[in-house]
Image: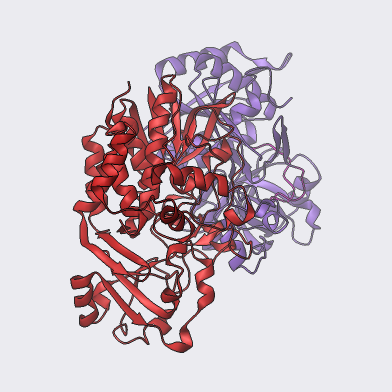
Chain colours: A purple, B red
Amino acid sequence: MNILIIWEGGRTLFRYVDCIDAGTEYCPCHLAEKGECIICSQLRGKNFCDCLNWKGTCIYEEFIWNNKKAKRIREFKEFTIENKRLIRDDLLLLQVSVNPYLAKQLNNIGSYVFLKKPGSPLCFATPVSIMDSDIKNNLITMVVKILGVKTKDLLECKDKVELKGPYWNGIQGQIFLKNLKGNEILIVARGVAAAPCVMAAKKLIKANNKIMVVLEKGRGNGNFAKERFKSLGCEVYDVNMINYNDYSLSEEFKNLLLELIKKNNFKVTISGGSDEFHRLYLNFVYALDKSLKFATVNNAIITCGEGICGSCEVKLDRGIIKSCKQQYNPAEVFINLRGEGRK
Amino acid sequence: MKVVVIGGGWAGCAAALQAKKCGAEVILIERTDLLLGLGNVGGIIRNNGRFTAAEEMIALGAGDLFQIADRCARHKNVDFPGHKHATLYDVNIIEAEVRKYLYSMGINILFEKRVVDVEMEGKSIKSVYLHDGTEIEGDVFIETTGSTGPIGNCLRYGNGCSMCILRCPSYGPRISISMRAGVEDLQGLRSDESFGAMSGSCKLEKDSLSKEIREKLDRDGVVVIPVPKEDINMDKLNIKVCQQYALKEFAENIVLLDTGHAKLMTSYYPLEKLRKIPGFERVRFIDPYSGGKANSIRYLSMAPRDNHMKVIGVDNLFVGGEKSGLFVGHTEAIVTGTLAGYNAVRLGIGLNLVELPSTLAVGDIIKFENENKKTLDGLKQRYTFAGAVYFERMKQLDLYTTDIEKIRKKVDGLLLRDFFKNRII
């Protein structure tokens, strides 16, 4: 059994397994068809029910009623680019006009899509987080960091882009963000990873949570998302987070965190940065407050988004997580509780 | 000493009640918003050997739930094919009565909370986890989650989810706690050696039946109407849980019992065919809602146990009801649940565990089922005081009697009068 252990003050909480697609219109998927369903024992080669995470529908029943076939997989469709501009030499802001279905489905925490230039081969598809989805005008906003072959290809798009979605696993630890009402939440974000944090802030503010955001000053005029966070009503702080000579957290950042954690009663903190940053940041704040829960921007190399290709696999002691669609508890991956976690 | 009971059906209620009477702190966790589980669509007690068993339990001091059921009776001393002196309790009122009684005894009940996992310490359960991650610690645990459903099982081994009273789609699926604790489940077999068995009765909305049938039900408690010849299906008897009702008469006749609804003694019945029967022209199913095509599947999740009702392989887990064997019915659930509750407390305070004597039907059935279950043929049987192989045994061993005085004297002779009433903490 592929189990996920949630840590509670250094203790195991409960074995938690979640597939972000379970119970959606994309479930059962090809994993179920091949006897590899993340949730359902009957679709994992067993003869009896041992449901690992009930999300309101029986996946086995859906599978049988769908003539023992996976549901139709998400496919690329062409959409119109409404706005495309470089907001820094390597950061591309993209606004794409989509259909109402996609706009609504992407207006969720952790939403992402695959993008590619029309006509480019499938291997050019790159996953991009949704920063905002305007469900009135069916307009989605994304920020892409131009890094390599795929993103350079995307930069060449003119007025059209091919888009495949919706996907929702762009943020890990979503269980801790669900049903949060009237709480205080700390978002810490650097660079392009701030984009999915904007969406998270928007949804959490709608549920009457108070959000504080610490952003990396970085190069130029601060983080591109700063004004967005401010207009949502977040309290925003600018700092330099990292000492680059030894890649450690700066004193300035640590002091600010100490002060914020002392003053506020944060239930959850969202980390928007690289895995290396997640590890530094989570361990630092965990030492200050053991009851803090974590959500992290998903940095896995995501290629298919369907749990098939294997590029997003996170290896843990107890098994492999297909992190493009399977949730994990960030604490298990990044906190060095007993010297464990992903190396 | 904290006893955690998982599953609030008849067996869980009996276990919680007994553990409380023994002096333990008790928490009862129920997945849905109702106690009694399938007992909400049961209703038949005191038929055949169940009369003896109920009176034995009353004499032993564990009559609380039987007395509530007796108080909720719509009909007493009803005979129907193969069955004598049945009491039919009103399924529409009994749950509230049991709930009130358990609350009055000081039992904590958590509704709409589903246990999904266990935390082990060696071979003992340290705590259980609810679906929302809440951890509940205890000294001893009793699993009375039954063996019915969930949807995937009802589909693989039956005709799909029939929307029964267990309401898995609304409250989430049953999880085998013993299996999460590392003990493999046992399964009952049908005569063709396929797994499981289908629940054996459905409920019809009484108001949808003709005036004549309604009046006869209200008056006599039972109505027997011949099935049209072309619709008689003997094969249907083989799939039933309730072998005591798998008699020829139940295939050739529609047998209705008045339990508040009209209890139809067959697993399912296509609505079009049912409506051809005079008086049934407007009939509708009330449980399961899809009684026209399916019913729930049972016996897919039994834990191996000893005759103290302790699970073999886990040091502090007890079982009762269908979770503990191929038992059928509320009487059997109360008997096994009560013993589980009693022994759970004994274990918790370091006392040796007890078995019920074989000279009583309530003790004999626990041992007989456990012994027989070891064979392939035994796995195809169901064990109930009300019929089939065990009622035959009761008659052979002279365990069956309706003489209450005789039962009391027998219990007195064993020095067990009011045995379950004693506080042991």
Q: Does the rendering let one see residue A78?
A: yes
Where in the figure is residue A253, as x and y percent of width and height?
A: 56, 16
In which image quadrant can residue B291 be found?
A: bottom left
Q: Does the rendering let one see residue B108?
A: no
In which image quadrant can residue B208 be found?
A: bottom left
Q: Residue at x 32, y 23 (%)?
A: B424
| A244 vs B58, nearest the viewer | B58
Q: Residue at x 56, y 49 (%)?
A: B372
Magenta segment's dominant SS is loop
| A68 vs B194, nearest the viewer | B194
| B255 vs B16, nearest the viewer | B255
- Judge left or right: residue B8 versus residue A126: left
Is the residue A146 above or below the residue B49 in the image?
Answer: above
Residue B66 sits inside the magenta stretch = no
| A25 vs B383, nearest the viewer | B383
In magenta, the rendered stretch is A298-311
Where in the figure is residue B120, as x and y percent of width and height?
A: 56, 27
Q: Residue at x 77, y 46 (%)?
A: A152
Where in the figure is residue A153, as x and y percent of width and height?
A: 78, 50
**Viewport quadrant of the C terminus of chain A:** top right
**Viewport quadrant of the N terminus of chain A:** top right
Is the residue B376 above or below the residue A293 in the image?
Answer: below
- Judge left or right: residue B78 versus residue B368: left
